[in-house]
Image (tube, helix red, strand yellow):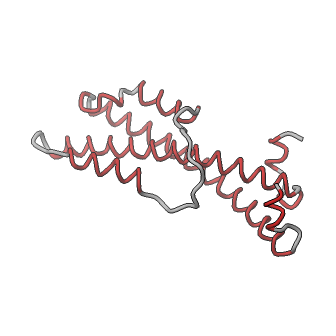
Amino acid sequence: MTETDVEHRDPAELSLTELRALRQRLQHEDDVVSYARRVAQARLDLVQTEQGRRDAGPDADLGGQIGEVLSHHLTGGPARPPRPTEDLSENPLVDELETLCAELHFGRLEELSTEELAALGDAVAAFEAKVSSNRRERFDRLDELSAELVKRYRSGEASVDSLLAD
């Protein structure tokens, strides 16, 4: 049976091993998606900060705001149980964002015309929305899998001791 077959089956039909493996794989995928989403949100905030600087006039100093924007994305967000961290920057989803930003000249925010800056903001916002939707679907599936695991632990079909044996 392929990963795709297992991924779409009713959690109640999965063996305990399949259930745990699928949940673990989806959690890892969520780490990648979450990373790409945070990077996209930070870049979108930087575009909006540049738009705000332009709106505020030529004497505006938004240097402090840029640090605040970046630190929010490094420390903000809901707490999750810690999982091992790894370098997630080498990933097709992250590469897609990097390509998008390179094509729309993200690295030259101050030099972009108002229209180019708006187009960049729209493109990054669309990417972030797509990633957020993907993440929501994954969360829904993870919730289903977790509920099935809890049900099995409560019924005695699965035990914590079996985790130690794996």
Name the quarter where the C terminus is drawn: bottom right
Q: Quadrant of the N terminus?
A: top right
Q: Write the residue at 27% across / 29% down.
A: 112
Residue 40, position in %: x, y?
45, 42
Residue 154, picture quadrant: bottom right
| Vertical side of 114 occupied by 162: above or below | below
Tell me which corner region of the image, top left, top right, bottom left or bottom right, holds residue 148. bottom right
Front residue of 145 and 126: 145
Task: Give the left or right position of residue 78, taking residue 142 as reference.
Answer: left
- Residue 155 lies left or right of residue 93; in this view the side is right
- Kindly identify the residue that appears in the image at 29 percent across and 52 percent down: 68
Residue 159 vs residue 126, the one in the foreground: 159
50 vs 98, nearest the viewer: 98
In the rendered image, which quarter is residue 55 located in? Answer: top left
Q: Is residue 13 above or below residue 106?
A: below
Q: Position of residue 118 (x, y in %)?
A: 34, 37
Q: Residue at x 24, y 32 (%)?
A: 110
- Of all residues shown, which one is farthest toward the left? 59
| Image coords of residue 6 (percent x, y) | 83, 47
Q: Is 104 situated above or below 52?
A: above
Kindly identify the residue that appears in the image at 87 percent across and 73 percent down.
156
Q: Position of residue 100 (x, y in %)?
A: 46, 29
Position of residue 11 relative to residue 135, above or below, is: below
